[in-house]
Amino acid sequence: MTRVLLVPGRNDPLPEHWQEWLARRDPARRMVRHATGGRYVADERVAALAAALDGVTEPTVLVAHSAGCLTVALWAASAGPGPVRGALLVTPPDIVEPWTDGKSALPALPDAPLPFPSILAASRTDPMMTYDRAAHWAGRWGAELVDLGDAGHLTTADGYGPWPLAEHLIARLAPRR
């Protein structure tokens, strides 16, 4: 069995958000919760992901949205693959200073391939990152780029509660038995 860990963005997802929808579809899926509110404190986010993976031995797929994609990339650069066998990175942002706590410097994003297969799903109308920038990061991280078309930032406000494509993309990353 493959474990799925959902890595949220800057805020915990709303109950109608596609990550919460995924969690409700399978009670074995877990959300990596954080205590930083609407701020992005990279060290705390990476520590929360590391804690969620501590002691995990079964193959794991990470499903990250927005700033959660940055957390996955930063964690992977410092920790290696561990039990992670794949990552779905959905609409990463070009992170900006107001997302931080005002004290934490934004770390440089890893500029090397992730140590596991990954898919970066990008929207052509994402206000948080242009499609060309998403394609750049997909190339740097060795991720397959999936074009979501006109999907905004893939939030509840953009119409994404249920998102069936996520199930298909997760299945592509899950280790074969």
Image (spheres, helix red, strand yellow):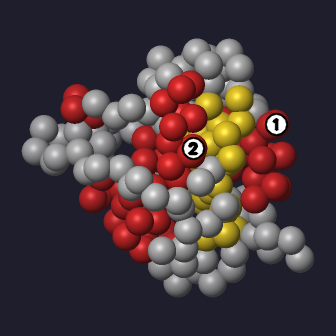
Quarter of image, res 174: bottom right
Seen in the picture, residue 53 relative to 92 is either above or below; the reply is below
Q: Residue at x 71, y 36 (%)?
A: 146
Measuring 54% from the left and 26% from the top, which residue is drawn there?
132
Mark 2 and mark 1 in contact? Answer it, CB < 8 Å: no
Q: Mark 1, residues whose alpha carbon is within 10 Å: few (<14), some, or many (≥20)? A: few
Q: Which residue is mark 2?
A: 138
Determine which quarter of the picture holds residue 163.
top right
Reading the image, the residue beneath label 1 is 164
State the image coordinates of residue 49 (x, y, percent, origin top left): 44, 63
Report crowding for label 2: few under 14, some 14 to 19, many 20 or more residues within 10 A (C-alpha).
many
Amino acid marked by disc 2: Ala
Q: Residue furthest right?
A: 177
Q: Residue furthest left?
A: 103
Q: Residue at x 75, y 32 (%)?
A: 162
Circle 1: element type: helix
Q: Is residue 131 above or below residue 118?
A: above
Instruction: Tell which of 122 and 2 is nearer to you.
Output: 122
Does residue 25 lie above or below 163 as drawn? below
Residue 23 seen in render:
yes
